[in-house]
Amino acid sequence: MANATGDGAHVNQCNPVYDHVTFDSCLQTCFFRNQPTMIEVDDIDTMTSTIFRNALWAAVNTGQPFVPVYINSLGGDLYAVLEMLDALRSAPIKVVTVCTGSAMSCGALLFAAGHERWIVPHGRVMIHDSWSMSAMGEKTTDKKADTDHLLRLTKELDWGMSQDIGKPHDFIGNILKRNMNANVYLNAEECIDLNIATHIGLPRFKAHVGLTYSLEPLAYPKRGSLPPLKRSARVTCEDGEPLPKRRARQDSSDEEEKGEGGA
């Protein structure tokens, strides 16, 4: 197991709490080129966004078909989560977000962006407008530029979250308006009803390693492609008589001598 840890994100590979690797019975040992990757997010800040982006592409390089992102966050920096959302939405593999406790403020935005969204039975999601997520920490009605900027961000975030969960672009904004733009807390069942979550429970990340078998034709050399055999050189005796002929003559004379001796 390998960990890459920052102030707000942890990247775990083959975490025994969530992961389970099984092997075919014919496999005794197996070495992964790259370990399966999962991502855990708590506090969201600029360091978190960098670690998150790198971990996401590390998961892509392992060849795994999806990457689980476990979220237990009370929120964080607005601009950091925007960078994380861009990385998540552009990932070429499926991202499965899992709320393991709380997904509030920026954590809710990240949770809603998953292709599949799991929440534990006692999980909580909290959404609100960008006034509360801004780094200034106070209403900025006396600063027109800041006000216009936050209003634009609020609309972008509301539209983006609504699109992520498959709802009309004003869906999240209408929920906030009905609540007088105050914090909106949702339990697991309410998240399912609003499609903010797609499943209730804690999924287990499994990796199965097996062997595949196939028959392939053996390539034989074509006829005529072999080089011709070389004829051996002729061996002669000192007097020029071929060696095979000399040996044959000697053998015949030896037989004659044996015949005379027997007579």
Image (cartoon, grey):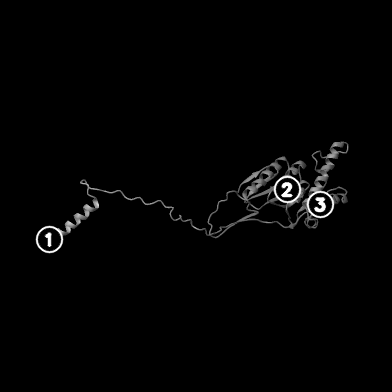
Residue furthest bottom in the image: 263
In the image, the segment drawn in magenta is: 259-263
Residue corresponding to mark 1: 260
Q: Nearer the viewer, mark 2 or mark 3?
A: 2
Whichever of callouts 1 and 3 sits on the residue coming sooner in the sequence is: 3
- From the top left corner, tell me how far across and down residue 57 is, in percent: 66, 46
Q: Nearer the viewer, residue 244 or 206?
A: 244
In the structure shown, which secondary structural element does the residue marked by tag 1 occupy? helix
The answer to whether marks 1 and 3 mark residues whose Cβ atoms lie closer than 8 Å is: no
| Residue that numbered label 3 is attached to | 185
* Marks 1 and 2, the one that precedes in the sequence: 2
N-terminal of the pair, mark 2 or mark 3, is 2
Q: Would you say the residues marked 1 and 2 are in contact, meaning their CB atoms lie under 8 Å apart?
A: no
The rendered magenta stretch, by its main secondary structure, is classed as: helix
- Residue at position x 73%, y 48% from top? 89
Numbered disc total? 3
State the SS at label 2: helix
Which residue is drawn at the image coordinates 83% and 44% (left, top)? Answer: 154
Q: Which quadrant of the view contains residue 6?
A: top right
Q: Which mark is residue 89?
A: 2
Q: What is the CA distance from the residue labelled 2 to the residue labelled 3?
A: 25 Å
Q: Mark 1 or mark 2, which is nearer to you? A: 1
Q: Amino acid at mark 1?
A: Glu
Q: Indicate the secondary structure of the residue bearing disc 3.
A: strand
Q: Report the Cα–Cα distance between label 1 and label 3.
A: 125 Å
Rounded to the nearest whole Å, what is the CA distance between mark 1 and mark 2?
107 Å
Counting from the top left corner in percent of width and height, residue 214 is at: 54, 59
Q: Position of residue 41 (x, y in %)?
A: 71, 47
Query: In the drawing, what numbered circle is on residue 225?
Result: none
